Amino acid sequence: MATEEELNTQIAELGEQIKKAKQEKKPKEEWDPFLKEMLALKAKFKEVTGRDHGPQTQVPKPKDSGQQEASEKNKEKRAAKAASKAKKEAEKAAKRAERERREREKAEKLAGIGQGNFGDAKMVKSHEITDKKWIEVGNLKPALAGQKVLIRGYIQVSRGVGKGVFVLIRSTLYTVQGVAFQNKTVSQGMVKYVSALPVESVVDVEGTVTVPENPVESATQKMVEIQITSFHCVSKAKQALPFLMEDACRPDEKKEADVGAYDENEEVKREDGLVRVGDKNRLDNRWLDLRTPANQSIMRIESMVGCLFRECLLSKGFIEVHPPKLIAGSSEGGSDVFTLDYFGQPACLAMSPQLHKQMAAACSGFERVFTTGPVFRAENSNTRRHLCEFTGFDMEMAIHEHYDEVMDVFSDLFIHIFDGINERCKAELERVREQHPFEDLKYLRPTLKITYAEGCTLLREAGIDQDDYEDLSTENEKKLGDIVKEKYDTDFFFMDKYPLSVRPFYTMPCPDNPKLSNSYDFFIRGQEILSGAQRIHEPDFIEERAKAWDIDLSTIEEYVNSFRNGALPHGGGGIGLERVVMLFLGLPNIRKASWFPRDPKRLAP
Amino acid sequence: MATEEELNTQIAELGEQIKKAKQEKKPKEEWDPFLKEMLALKAKFKEVTGRDHGPQTQVPKPKDSGQQEASEKNKEKRAAKAASKAKKEAEKAAKRAERERREREKAEKLAGIGQGNFGDAKMVKSHEITDKKWIEVGNLKPALAGQKVLIRGYIQVSRGVGKGVFVLIRSTLYTVQGVAFQNKTVSQGMVKYVSALPVESVVDVEGTVTVPENPVESATQKMVEIQITSFHCVSKAKQALPFLMEDACRPDEKKEADVGAYDENEEVKREDGLVRVGDKNRLDNRWLDLRTPANQSIMRIESMVGCLFRECLLSKGFIEVHPPKLIAGSSEGGSDVFTLDYFGQPACLAMSPQLHKQMAAACSGFERVFTTGPVFRAENSNTRRHLCEFTGFDMEMAIHEHYDEVMDVFSDLFIHIFDGINERCKAELERVREQHPFEDLKYLRPTLKITYAEGCTLLREAGIDQDDYEDLSTENEKKLGDIVKEKYDTDFFFMDKYPLSVRPFYTMPCPDNPKLSNSYDFFIRGQEILSGAQRIHEPDFIEERAKAWDIDLSTIEEYVNSFRNGALPHGGGGIGLERVVMLFLGLPNIRKASWFPRDPKRLAP
C-alpha cells in the first residue's frame, strides 16, 4: 500500500503534467488518462488517510496582539467555509474518479490489457530493492532472443507509426530499438504515452528480445529489437532541448582547419544545408553534448589512456606522486599563471608538476614517479589547441647514464597506449569514426627517433628555411610531420638534441656540443604532444645555467636547495592528455577531448 | 682520449674540491691527491689542445671611440705581460704535475693497486651508454653470493674502523652494507675517500656479494654484504644536513594525540633524551624527510591505494573523468574557497568534484565515473587532520533502485584496498611499523553497516548523550568507533540514514522518514573517511529542497539546469586519500601522508 507521502508526490506530478499539457494546448485525449489517474489516486488517498486530498485547513496560530482577534475570527470563518466547500468538491471528484477507475479497470480487464504497464514511475528514492534485473543495452544480443529483458536508458528518438511506436533507447554508447504496437498487452493509452514522452527522458523498458528480419541500421545493436511490454518514465526531460541529438550526432562534412584564432560563436554553415550545432551551443550544454555516441566514445578512450599510462608505468616500477597545485609566490617563472591569496600570502596555481616530480624522483630518492592531474595556464590563447586547464600526465625517473633510458620508457609507453586503444576500444573507435572520420595512426616499434639537426635537414631538403639552432614554428613542425610520414610511414616520432637556447635553464646541456641540449619533443601528426629532457642534478651547475639565462638566483633558491643534499641524475617529460586524444583521433578541436573545457572565454559549466 | 671540454670540467671540479677542503681546514693529506690529479689533468690538457690550461688571453674588441685607444693599448700591454707570466707558471706546474703523476703511477703499479677505482665520477651528462648493469638494492640476496654487482644509492651511514670503512647504501626503502678494507685493490686513499664523503651523497658502488656470518641488523638486506672494489661519487651532498637521518628514522616513543590545535613549531621532548626531529624542520626539508624508509613506505602505500582504487572501479565498469578545478563565481556554496581572477571574471577552486561528477554520471549518461585529484579548502583549520589541499578520490554512479547499490560497490572497494595493501605492501608495512608502531586494521566482509539511529543508541547505551536527529561530534564519532570495535571487532564500518538536516540540500530524503536522508559516512578507527549519499535527480525536487534550506535559487541555477534534460537516479561519495592512508597506518598526523603538505601556515616546498 502506498504511503500518504508517495500518493501526494504522484498526485502532484500528475497535476503538473496535466497543467503543462493544457498550457501546450495538447489534445484532451493526451492528458485525459493523467486526469483519470490523478482522481483515482485522490480516492486512494482518502482511503489511506481518511482525509480528502488537497491543501489542509490550517488552524492559524494565535497572535499576541488582541486587536487582531476580530479580523482573525472572520478569517477563520471564511477559511472554514472554504474548507467545507473544498471538501465537498473533493469528495465528489473522488467519487467520480473512483467510478471512472472501476469502469476503466473493467473495460481493460475485459480487453485483457493489464494495468500498470506504462506511466511515470515513482521517483527513485531507495524505497526498496526488488528482484528486478536490468541488462545493459550493450549486452543485448541475438542469443537472448525470446527472453524478457529490462533496460534503462534515454529515449534518443521516438517515431509513431499508425497504431504503434518505435523508440530508440540509448545507454552509454549503445542504442537498441524498441517497438510497441497495440495488442493484447499494449493499450492505445500506452502507445500514446510512449509517443508523447519528450526525447532524452530516462525510461525503464521491459520487453521480449526478438531478431528483426533486417538489421536495425539506426541502432548499434542492429541484430535485436525489443517488443515492449512495459514502459515507465524514470526522469522526464522537462525543458526544450537546446539542440536535437540528431543534429549533434551528424557526421562532419569536412575537417576544420587548425589555424588561426578560435571563436566558439563562429557559425559554420554546412554545404548540405542541414543543421550544424555550433560549438557555443554544444559547450553551453556540455552535459547534453556529451551524450552523443561519438563524445561518449572519446571520453571512454580518454579514460582508457589514463588506465594504459598507469598500467605501463606501474609495471616498470613507477609510483604515483600527488604534487601540490598551490605554489608559493605570485609567479612560477612566467606571467601566464593564475594568482591567488593564500591566507595573506601570494600564491599561484602550478603550471606543471616539474619541481615536485623532480624532488620526488631525484631528491627524495623515489627514483621513478608519475602523476596525472590538472595543469593551469593563464595564457590568453584562443586557438583550437590550447586550454587554460588541462590534464597533465607527467613522469620523472632517475637515469644511470643517459636520457635514452627515459626515451626508451616513453617509446614503450606510447606503443602500449596506442596498441591498447586499438585493441580495447574497438566499439568506441567505430562510434568516433562515424561522426569524425580519421585515418588510423601509424607508428613504428620501437618509435622512430631523429635528431633536431636531422629534422632541420629534412625541412631544408624540402626547400623550407630552417636553422639548426633556431626554434621550430608550429607551421614547420607540421611540415616536418608530413615529410617524416612520407619518408618513414609513421605519424609518431621523437626528436632529440634541441638547441640549448630554446629549452628551460634547468635542461642538461649536450656533452658534445654546448649549443645543444639533452632534450626531446614527441610528435603526433606533426603536433607536439610531449616535451622533456634530462635535467641538471648538480646545484652549482643549475645556478651557472640560470645565470647564463639572467635569472635572479633568489627566485630559484628553493628549487636549487633541494639538490644540495645529493640528487640522482634524472630526466622525464609531460604529456597533455587532451592533446594526445585529440591527435590520435584526428579531432578538429581540443575542446572535444576535454570533459568541461576551460579557455580564456569559457569557465562553465 | 678526453675532450677539451671534459678536461676543463674535471679540472674545475677538482679545483672546487681543493678550495672547499682548504676552506674547511681539512688536513693536506685529504686534498693533496686532488691537487696532484688536477695538475696531471692540466698536463693532459696541454697535450690535447696545445695550449696551457687557464683563463685565455682575450683580445679586447676594438671600440668605436678614438679617445680610449691609448688606455686600451696600455691595457693590452699589461695583459700580454700577465699572460706570458701565467703561461710560464702553468708550464712549470704542468711539468711538476706530470713528474708527480708518473711517480705515483710507478708506486701504485709496484703496490698492485689499480687506478680509477674511486673518486668523483664525471657528471652524468648522457655521454654514452656503456655495458654497465646496475642492480637494485632490494634485489640483493644471498643467491648472488660471489657475483660482482654494481649499485647506485645514497650513503645513509659511513663508519671508519681502523684500516677500513663500513657504509650503508640506501636506494628507495632498501639498504645494504658495503665494506672496504685496505687490500690489494683497496688503497689507503680509497678508504679515506669513502670515509670522507658526506652522508646522503649519491654513489656508485661496485663489489662482490658475500654472505656475512651474522645478519647485518642495520640493513634491510641483512643476509648479504658487498665487498667494495670500486666507489665513485655521483652527486655530492654539498650542504650541512638540517637533521641527521638517524634522528629522522628513530621509532616514535608514544602516539601524538589527535586533539586540539596543531603547531608544527611545537617542540616535543623525547623521554629518552634522544634528538627528536620537529615537524617544522622535517617539512621545511620535505625532500630529505621523504628519504626515511618509513616515509618511502607511506608514499608507496599511498600510490598503491590509488592503483587499487582504480583497479577495482575499472573492473566494475567505471571510467575516469577529469572535472575542472576552476569554477565560475567567487563562492561555491561556502566561504572556505580560494578565489581568483580568471581573465576578468571571478572564479574559485573546486572544493569537490561534486557537480561535474554528477553531470558526467547522471546527466551525460556515463553511468559510472570516478576521479582522483586535488581538492581545495581555504579552511583556517590548524589540526592534525586537515589540509588545505588534499587528494580526493571520488566516484558517482547511476542506481536502479536503491543507494545500497552504491554502498555495495564501496564495500567491495574498501575490502579490495585493505586486502591489496596487506598483500602487496608487506615490506612497506614493516618499514612503517618499525618507526610508527600500529595495530593491524580489522575489517569485516562484507563491511559492517549500521544506521545512524543504531549508532546513536549504542552511544546512549554507553551513557553518552546523543540525539538521533543531531550531528555527531568528532569526539562522539571516536567513542562510537571504540564501541563498535568492542562489539563487532572491526575498525571499519558504514553508517547510513543520517538526519536530513545535517546533509547538503541536494541529498535525497529518506522515503520512510522525512527527517532522515539517504546518506552515509564511512569510518576508520572512529574517524570519518568517506561521505556520500543518493542525490536528488529531479530538478523541481532539488529546487524544493534548496528552498527549504533558504538557498537563493539563482546561485544553483546551472546545477539544476543540468538535470532538466532527463537524469539518471544516482549516488556516490568521496574519500580523502591522505586520511585513508593516515588512518589505515594509524599515523599521528595527516601531514605524514601528504607528499608536500599545504595547511594555513605552510605553502612550501
Image (cartoon, coloured by chain):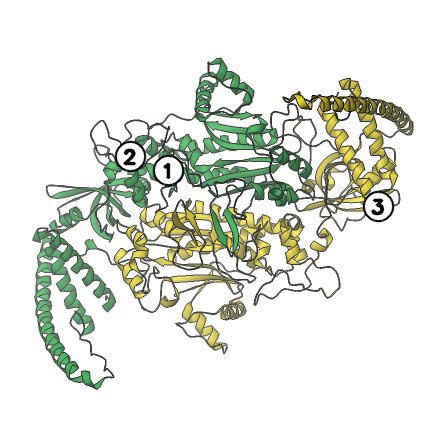
Chain colours: A green, B yellow
Q: Which mark is residue A591?
A: 1
Residue B103 picture location, percent across and down: 90, 26
Q: Residues within 10 Å of mark 2 (few under 14, many from 20)?
A: few
- The residue positioned 78% from the left and 17% from the top of the image is B50
Viewer-nearest residue: A187 or A527: A527
Looking at marks 2 and 1 on the same chain, the residue that comes earlier in the sequence is marked by 2
Residue type at mark 1 is: Arg
Q: Which mark is residue A177?
A: none
Residue type at mark 2 is: Glu
Q: Which residue is mark 2?
A: A266
Q: Residues within 10 Å of mark 3 (few under 14, many from 20)?
A: some
Q: Are marks 2 and 3 on the same chain?
A: no
Q: Is residue B228 visible?
A: no
Residue A263 picture location, percent across and down: 33, 35
Residue type at mark 3 is: Gly
Q: Secondary structure at mark 2?
A: loop
Q: Quadrant of the N terminus of chain A?
A: bottom left
Between the C-alphas of marks 2 and 3, the distance is: 75 Å
